[in-house]
Image (cartoon, rainbow, N blue to C red):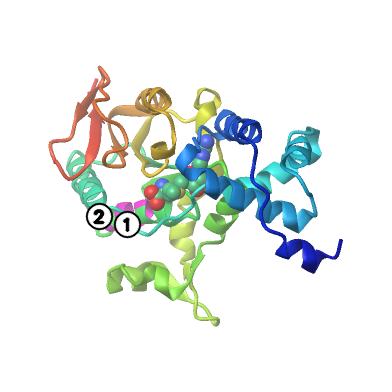
């Protein structure tokens, strides 16, 4: 069949069994749940990729994706189509205001070891760079302006490569204060803006599946941001992940979660931050 003709074929509906198989595969590997309301989303994105590859049916493509190392490469591409990677700088301002207040408070107690901040599900880097800018601003007029490091982790290699690249279109920076843009980004010849090397040097990005936190070397974190990721997960899994994140916090550390992403979760070591605009906790000090 000619590819042009194939592209015009109407989408074949997925059978209930095929839907369940794809749904289960995505949840098992990423935690992301595609419910019945998002069935069309799954079907559209799968079939778009299948067209690119010239695969005619969902079952063959499923076998391809689950078949050994070659399947793993294809899975990595497909993942970007099936997960939401939308993000912004300083997304949810109140969370960053709480961060700033928290870091200023820490500063008053003096600087011992460098602050370690972690963006869980960092997508293309806007969140970890926002954390880095937040810390850099608090430390700006101190004797140790670089006394922090930010780690961004994500399951998507494509998102991580964008994060490492640290270049953004002008529209991405529109919402940011002009003086922050000026201090932390350099305009490129093509009109895009690149994070300045001094800030980029404080940020590192690595692949980490939040379902595998038990294997992660992260501990003693001063700040953890986990926003707009758990929303796609089942409730029991959200709680399980938050329990692990709580354990990765240093005594006195701050955990910020997306508002409304987990209801009624508590941890014996954590104290909720008294600010109704945010969902944040600090770990009890030793
Ligand atoms: C909507 S973005 C949120 C980005 C940022 N935290 C924010 O609030 O703007 C969700 C990110 O979570 C990532 N993600 C999805 N499942 C994941 C998993 N199991 N482990 C790690 N990252 C995951 C996606 O690749 C995506 O980049």
First to last magenta residue range: 131-137
What secondary structure characterizes most of the magenta part?
helix
Asked whether residue 234 is drawn in magenta, I would say no
Quadrant housing the C terminus: top left
The numbered dot on residue 90 is 1
* Rendered residue at 50%/32% (across/down): 210
* Rendered residue at 51%/32% (across/down): 31
* Rendered residue at 71%/65% (across/down): 8
Of 90 and 277, nearer the camera is 277
Of 236 and 170, nearer the camera is 236
Of 82 and 108, nearer the camera is 82
Horizontal placement of 271 versus 130: left or right? Answer: left
Quadrant housing residue 29 = top right
Name the residue tied to disc 2: 93
Residue 37 visible in the picture:
yes
Quadrant housing residue 103 = top left
Q: Residue furthest right?
A: 1
Q: Does dot 2 land on a helix, a strand or a loop?
A: helix
Q: Does dot 1 land on a helix, a strand or a loop?
A: loop
Between the residue at mark 1 and the residue at mark 2, the CA separation in whole angstroms equals: 6 Å
Badge 1 vs badge 2, beta-carbon distance below 8 Å: yes
């Amino acid at each position: 069949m000619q590819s042009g003709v194939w592209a015009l074929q109407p989408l074949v509906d997925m059978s209930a069994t095929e839907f369940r198989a794809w749904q289960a595969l995505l949840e098992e590997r990423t935690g992301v749940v595609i419910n019945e309301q998002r069935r069309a989303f799954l079907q559209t994105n799968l079939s778009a990729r299948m067209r690119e590859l010239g695969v005619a049916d969902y079952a063959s493509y499923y076998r391809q994706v689950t078949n050994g190392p070659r399947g793993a490469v294809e899975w990595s591409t497909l993942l970007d189509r099936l997960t939401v990677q939308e993000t912004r700088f300083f997304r949810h301002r109140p969370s960053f205001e709480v961060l700033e207040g928290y870091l200023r408070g820490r500063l008053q107690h003096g600087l011992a070891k460098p602050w370690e901040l972690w963006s869980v599900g960092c997508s293309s880097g806007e969140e970890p760079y926002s954390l880095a800018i937040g810390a850099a601003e608090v430390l700006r007029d101190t004797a140790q302006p670089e006394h922090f490091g930010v780690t961004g982790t994500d399951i998507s290699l494509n998102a991580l490569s964008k994060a490492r690249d640290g270049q953004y279109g002008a529209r991405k920076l529109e919402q940011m204060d002009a003086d922050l843009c000026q201090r932390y980004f350099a305009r490129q010849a093509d009109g895009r803006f690149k994070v300045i090397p001094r800030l980029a040097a404080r940020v590192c990005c690595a692949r980490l599946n939040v379902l595998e936190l038990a294997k992660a070397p992260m501990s003693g974190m001063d700040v953890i941001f986990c926003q707009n990721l758990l929303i796609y997960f089942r409730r029991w899994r959200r709680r399980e992940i938050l329990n692990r994140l709580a354990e990765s916090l240093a005594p006195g550390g701050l955990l910020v979660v997306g508002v409304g992403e987990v209801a009624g979760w508590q941890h014996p070591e954590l104290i909720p931050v008294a600010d109704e605009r945010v969902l944040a906790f600090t770990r009890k000090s030793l």
